[in-house]
Image: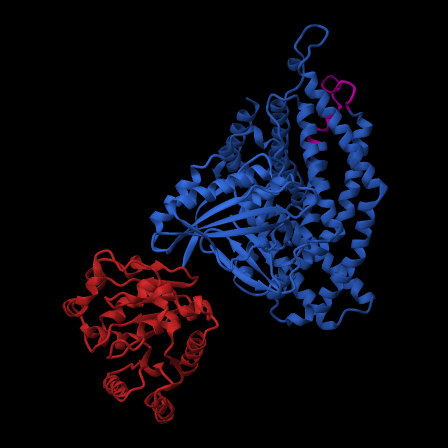
Chain colours: A blue, B red
Amino acid sequence: MTTPGLAGFIASGEDSQTCDVVVAEVLEALGQGFGLLPERGAPRGGRRRTWFDTFDWRLYRAGLTLEYAAAHRGGELRLSGAAPVRDTVQPVTGWQASRPHQLRDLPDGPIATSISGVVAPRALLPEVTVTRTTAAYRLLNEDGKTVARLLVEYPAVAAGDVRPLPPRLTITEVRGYLTQARRAARIVAGIPGVRPVTQPLLADALHAIGRYPGDYSNKVAANITGRMPAAEAAATILLRLLDTVEANVPGVLRDIDTEFLHDLRVSVRRSRSALKLFGDALTAPLAARGTALTGRELARFAAEFKWVGDLTTPIRDLDVHLLDFEDTVRTLRAAKPDDLEPFRAYLKQRRVREFRVLARGLRSPRFVTLTRDWRERLTAIRDSANAGTAGTVRSGQSRRAAVETTGTLAADRTRLAFAKVAKRGAAITPASPHDTLHDLRKRCKELRYALEFFAPLYRADSYGAVLADLKRLQDGLGEFQDTEVQIGEIRALATSMLAADEAPAVTLLAMGEVTAWLAARQQAAREDFERRFAAFAGVDGQRRMAELLRGGAA
Amino acid sequence: MKIYATYNIKGGVGKTTTAVNLAYLAATESKLRTVLWDLDPQAAASFMFRVKPRVKGGGKALIRGTRALDDAIKGTDFDNLDLIPADFTYRNMDLLLDSAGGKPGRKLAKLLAPLAAEYDAMFLDCPPGISLVSENVLHAADVIVVPLIPTTLSVRTLDQLTEFVAEFDGRRPDVLAFFSMVDRRKNLHREITENFSSERARVAATFVPYLAVVENMSVQRAPVTVFAPRSSAARAYRALWSEIQDSTE
């Protein structure tokens, strides 16, 4: 049996002809060191291979690659990665390489088992398709025995006018003949123009179409520094958020999976928070040399983003119910799982209606104008603020000194956001109304976003410690509010179902049981609040925050 | 892992050609992960697969376990098919098995056990004769494939073997014989092949004729199905492999 490739090489050259010359030289050199025979019966035409991943590269980030190879009948999926996955192959039928696939499209089997926890609730999208022709050779010893194999692959990206990828050469060991395979690899490595493979074919293919693995993330990760003018950093952060909004619109409109809308909403919410936190930096005339926004314009953009946020809320609320549906069903004690099915059907039906409204909104001139104008204004501010740092003001004073830096802005605004959280949280007692906790949740979100926007300025360990405590506090507050919202929604939905004559009594009873379960969860979250708050905003928490901000402003 | 052994007390009856062809068919046509162990110091199976008949440390290292059997495995030129080569020291394997400690008749079965995870099928190509090696093989195998030349004496050896196996305590291998090197021009061959199959339950209906192409294997150094895939010999081995699988399921 042959083992997986011992050594992989690229025959590199300026064009395909030069690459072919390199391959010919490899064959000649191997022919001198071994007997060299074309492999009998080896397929010359390679199968089309399409790599799949979620939009946010969940498989790639988990160290996995999922590849589909089409065959005459059906095809196969191959999942590769470190143990315990290694190399898992599963035949599939009716799988189309050109369209997204939901996890439920994946037949039961080892691949579905391995990836569902990583991928859910996202869909698998085709990233890139590669076709290839291959030529296989056997390297023989003096007895005419095959001691190694050479596979020459000529890959090409199946997309428009993309230049062919350089040929790949793989030496494969035959079991028990490692020494000879190593000798063959040394011969190949010695040929001018041959270099070792450093990245998988997927990465090469993505590069050829101007992409790279992990090229989308919903993280802010804006390219900012502490010394940058505040206006430039503010515009850079907001542009990055706009990129994320726009990147998700097609996925939302095609309704590929629920997380496109989720990421879009998060970026809209972050944009609104950013405007609140440091929108004034975009209005500073000195930094932005005539490109600055007026206070009125700022308010208009803020209002437009609120409109986008509101537009997306009904669908997201329905998505949350549907995503949690199976978990909810499992909590039923008195009711039967089927009792809730009319509720699920009603949620789906509502979603279809609400989706039309959302799609109309995202396709509307209002939305298109908003994103176009926003990008134009932010780009101008960013570029002029950046250009401004090089010059001097009339008095001869360095412009940089006159302009607020990102480091100062970050420290000021984050400190303020933290102070609000600390003050309002400390005022909450067991007797405080629910709204005080809901308000604190909003302040925590603002603080979280402030930290995330300026994350590149901080030391990773201090940042991680502050964020972990804040996240725990937010989770508790989120649970407290979300359960309340869901109870309210279920009650409202029950009323509309009843009005529409679509609510069997057992369904209403089951829905009642679900609200009781949610109420118990809300109560538990309320009881845990003091502990989580003290961990974040107590003496130690304040010290950690102060240290973090000192480091960022430096 | 199912273990097949090609065995006969007599030599020159086609054990090695059978082992080589059946192992090849198991690997390439039945897609079973297959390994063939050439236990015969004459190394004919190793020669046919162009593998040098040499094992580091010799049979002693393998039997005593100082070298894992796994280390001795060589890939053949064919997918799914590996070989454990012969070594001249196998001529002393009786002595090695006897002095290895434990039950001398069951030593081989114990050695093969770790390969079960890696292979679906194993073929043991045995040297002729009744010896401790053959006793080990008979205990380790699930199926004993016995090539018989259609002569009265040859048929007697099958009876001897069947009686020997019947005396085993516990698990007994399936014994399945078939006629090999059959020359239809000879009356005796014709009579024995026609009558014997119907008289004995464990004799295959398929027989392998005496053909020059089979002898040519040692010139081509490959299974007959590789260099003469449409020959009547190749057809006969395919039919035999199919019958063995059906009758030993």
The answer to which of A414 and A84 lies nearer the viewer is: A84
Extreme-right residue of the structure: A365
Image position of A119 with respect to B102: above or below: above
Type of secondary structure dominating the magenta stretch: helix
Image position of A69 with respect to A62: above or below: below
The total of numbered circles placed on residues is: 0
User: Is residue A213 found inside the magenta-colored segment of the image?
Assistant: no
**Which span is picked out in magenta?**
A276-292
Extreme-top residue of the structure: A395
User: Is residue A291 found inside the magenta-colored segment of the image?
Assistant: yes
Percent x, y for residue A110?
52, 62
Q: Quadrant of the C terminus of chain A?
A: top right
Percent x, y for residue A347?
74, 61
Q: Quadrant of residue B98?
A: bottom left
Please state if A459 lies on the left or on the right of A122 as rendered: left
Residue positioned 31% across, 63% down in the render: B46
Q: Quadrant of the N terminus of chain A?
A: bottom left
Please state if B103 lies on the left or on the right of A9 as rendered: left
The answer, for residue A430, to whether it is visible in the render is no
Percent x, y for residue B225?
44, 69
